[in-house]
């Protein structure tokens, strides 16, 4: 959803509260595509503080379904966010890029709510997603979920680079 900021910019001291629905059904990134399981509307409070500077307050929440890093079961992960930021509308997009300003959700006089939510999810992305703290993962041979019980695969997993040393020890056993 795009929000036109020109009306707010026209009156110094004007405040506008907007409830913007989140329309994304999936979150796309270089990590993949993750379905959105739940979403709350984003509550935006935009205030013209003067001299073409807008004060933005935004809060909302999105829940994504992300696979467990060990067993690949889908795990609902909440991404609540609340941000407060001043946006200088006099600064051009080229100057923002030079200053490494990460406000890529403002273009001209429009604020892109979907891009704002996307940025907040990226910032809050967890390092590891687990279905449970003691998740056992999956068997590297047969792919069985080890949380459901052990598999029938041979449990001895030797590093193939150590085969020469293993052969030496097996010769000692024969003697």
Image (cartoon, helix red, strand yellow):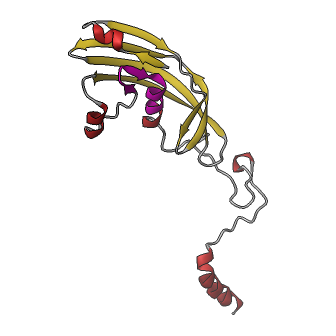
Q: How many marks?
A: 0
* Place of residue 78 in the rendered image (x, y in percent of width and height, measured from the top left): 53, 29
* Place of residue 103 in the rendered image (x, y in percent of width and height, measured from the top left): 35, 30
Compare residues 112 and 123 and report the one nearer the observer.
112
- Which quadrant of the view contains residue 31? top right
Magenta span of residues: 106-120
Q: Residue at x 62, y 36 (%)?
A: 75
Compare residues 110 and 127 and report the one nearer the observer.
110
Q: Residue at x 58, y 32 (%)?
A: 64
Compare residues 140 and 91 and report the one nearer the observer.
91
- Which quadrant of the view contains residue 120? top left
Farthest residue, direction right:
152
The image shows residue 92, relative to residue 45, as above or below, that is: below
Compare residues 34 and 51 and report the one nearer the observer.
51
The image shows residue 33, relative to residue 6, as above or below, that is: below
* Place of residue 141 in the rendered image (x, y in percent of width and height, measured from the top left): 72, 61
Question: Is 148 situated left or right of 87 in this image?
Answer: right
* Place of residue 49 in the rendered image (x, y in percent of width and height, measured from the top left): 24, 13
């Amino acid at each position: 959803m795009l929000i036109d900021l020109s009306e707010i910019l026209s009156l110094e001291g004007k405040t506008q509260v907007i409830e913007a629905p989140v329309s994304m059904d999936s979150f796309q990134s270089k990590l993949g595509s993750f379905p959105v399981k739940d979403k709350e509307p984003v509550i935006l409070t935009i205030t013209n503080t003067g001299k073409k500077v807008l004060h933005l307050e935004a809060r909302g929440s999105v829940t994504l379904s992300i696979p467990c890093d060990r067993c690949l079961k889908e795990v609902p992960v909440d991404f609540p966010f609340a941000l407060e930021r001043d946006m200088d509308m006099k600064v051009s997009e080229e100057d923002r890029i030079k200053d490494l300003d990460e406000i890529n959700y403002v273009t001209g006089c429009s604020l892109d709510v979907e891009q704002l939510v996307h940025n907040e999810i990226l910032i809050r992305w967890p390092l590891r997603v687990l279905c449970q703290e003691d998740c056992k993962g999956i068997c590297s041979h047969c792919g069985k979920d080890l949380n459901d019980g052990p598999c029938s695969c041979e449990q001895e997993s030797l590093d193939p680079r150590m085969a020469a040393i293993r052969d030496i020890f097996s010769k000692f056993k024969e003697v």
